[in-house]
Image: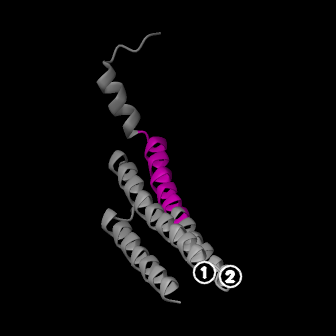
Amino acid sequence: MADDKPAGDRAAKEHDDPRTAWAEDRTVLANERTFAAWMRTGMACIGVALGLKAVFGATDYPIIAKVVAELFIFCAILIFWAAARRCRATLSRMDEHDANAQSHQNMALTATVLTAGAVASGVILWLL
């Protein structure tokens, strides 16, 4: 039997379904977990940079070790801001119901602090 209601009414009814609301809340929370995973990946890049400097710092060509370490620092910064941008894009498409999502300002602040740490690590690596 066909539904006689217009498509707009069906969409509004589906949106009122608690299962749809819970699914959106799960997506909001998954977005935050994904953001945290991107931050961990960026921090791992900084760890690789420190490891490269520690392992290859005493070579005949320390400049090469510093340049490669700086590339990983740069990758970390790109990862931090790509995560913030993607998190904002996802949150703009979602509605919160029972879950309270972190604001974009909090995500941007986290990315800013980690970027400052990455830049400071890069400066220290270059000066060593």
Q: Residue at x 40, y 70 (%)?
A: 111
SS of the residue under disc 1: helix
Q: Residue at x 41, y 53 (%)?
A: 86
Q: Is residue 11 above or below residue 77?
A: above
Residue under circle 1? Answer: 62
Visible residue check, residue 42: yes
Q: Residue at x 50, y 71 (%)?
A: 73
Q: Is residue 68 above or below residue 16?
A: below
Category of crowding for the residue at label 1, using alpha-carbon neighbours closer than 10 angstroms: few (below 14), some (14–19), many (at least 20): some
Q: Residue at x 44, y 62 (%)?
A: 78
Q: Is residue 70 magenta?
A: no
Task: Work out whether residue 88 or residue 81 is closer to the camera in this orientation and state it.
Answer: 81
Secondary structure mostly taken by the magenta-highlighted segment of the chain: helix
Residue under circle 2? Answer: 59
Are discs 2 and 1 less than 8 Å apart at CB?
yes
The residue stretch that appears in magenta: 17-37
